[in-house]
Structure formats: C-alpha cells, structure tokens
Amino acid sequence: MTSDQFTIAKNKEQRLIERLLKKVHATYGKDPFIIIAENGLSVSLGASDDFLQCNEWSFSRFLPENSTIEINRRQLDYFWNEMYPGCPQDLKYRYACWRELWHFWIYQRFASVHSLLQHQGNLYIASFINQPKACQNYFSHYLAGIATGLISRPAQEPTFRHAGNPLV
C-alpha cells in the first residue's frame, strides 16, 4: 500500500469513526461513563502492578473476562501531562473511557451499537476488526480525541476555488 492509499484508507476510517460517534452522542449522550454503565461495564481506577505493557503510554485497558475498563492513574497522569499539558484534568478520565469503549466495540464486533449503524454494520466490521494492534490503538486515540474535543474534526475538502490558493 502506498502512502497515498494509506492516507485515503485512514481518512475513510476516520470518517466512519466520526459518524459512529455522532450516532452514539445522539442516542446515548456525550458522557462515556453513562455509556459504559448502560453496556454493563465497570471502571476500575488504580495503579495495578500487573498492568499490561507497563510503559508510560499504556494507561488503560478493556478486560473482557470481567467486563471492566481498568485505568492506571499514574500512567494516565504521565501520558496526559506529556501529550495534553494545560488541558483540563477532568478530561483525562473521559479520554481513557472513550478509548476503551472503542476496544469494547471492537471486541464485541460492534454488537451493542449495531442498531445505530443500521445497514452499515458490516462495513464497520470489515473496516476495523482485522486491523493490526497499532492501527487499533491509533483509532482508539482518534475516537477519544474527537469525543473529548481534543482533536477537532477535519475540515471539509477544499473547494475548487480554494484548491489553488494555499494558506500562507
């Protein structure tokens, strides 16, 4: 896959994530804690010694065996202060929860949001289920970023009038 093909594929997937988030917001609201509760999941905060892939960038995980989202406070604090210095501290837990909601949806093959996707459910499954772990991680951060407002949605494609006049 060329870099142009990768960019086109990534943009398509980002638009799918944005559409999913818009439908989730319209149906369930914007609070990830409510969405987590309505899906029968729980959130555990702590500083577990057995945290998977213990490094400064691994701060949360979805544990399907007990329907829990685990957030490591110490690692989340480090990540947040490095990546989003000056951003409100209350957003970091929402960010972590949105990130793990993505992993939950992937794990269950979008079953809990299938009614929101309607006829596009198979498109989401085909687009995201067999992605490499690095891509899944990227998409989870993308969802968390747009859901919390830390990443603004991409601007519309430039019109013909703007195409020849790049911003200086």
Image (cartoon, rainbow, N blue to C red):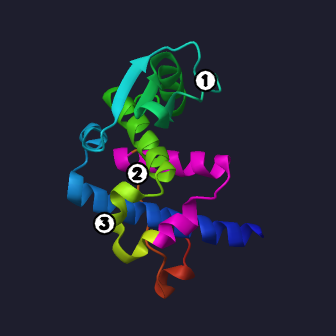
Query: Crowdedness of circle 2 by 10 Å Cα count: few (<14), some, many (20+)?
Result: some
Q: From the image, tell me which residue sits under label 2.
A: 146
Calculate the distance from the C-alpha at mark 3 to the C-alpha at mark 2. 22 Å
What is the CA distance from the residue labelled 1 to the residue labelled 3? Answer: 37 Å
**For numbered disc 2, what is the local secondary structure?**
helix
> For this rendering, which residue is in front, 61 or 153?
61
Whether the residues at callouts 2 and 1 have beta carbons within 8 Å, the answer is: no
State the image coordinates of residue 11 (x, y, percent, origin top left): 55, 67
**In the displayed structure, would residue 101 be above or below residue 157?**
above
Q: Name the residue under label 3.
A: 115
Where is residue 121 shown, x and y percent of the image?
A: 43, 69
Mark 1 element type: loop
Q: Is the magenta stretch mostly helix, strand or loop?
A: helix
Residue type marked 2: Ile
Which label belongs to residue 56? 1
- Please state which amino acid type lies under the numbered disc 3: Ser
Q: Quadrant of the C terminus?
A: bottom right
Residue lying at 42% horizontally and 74% vertically, measured from the top left: 120
Residue 167 in view here:
no
Q: Is residue 55 left or right of residue 101?
A: right
**Res 108 visible:** yes
Amino acid type indicated by mark 1: Glu
Which segment is the magenta one? Answer: 122-149
* 19 to 149, vertically: above or below: below
1 magenta-colored: no
- x%, y% of residue 126? 56, 68
- Residue farthest toward the bottom in the current orientation of the protein: 160
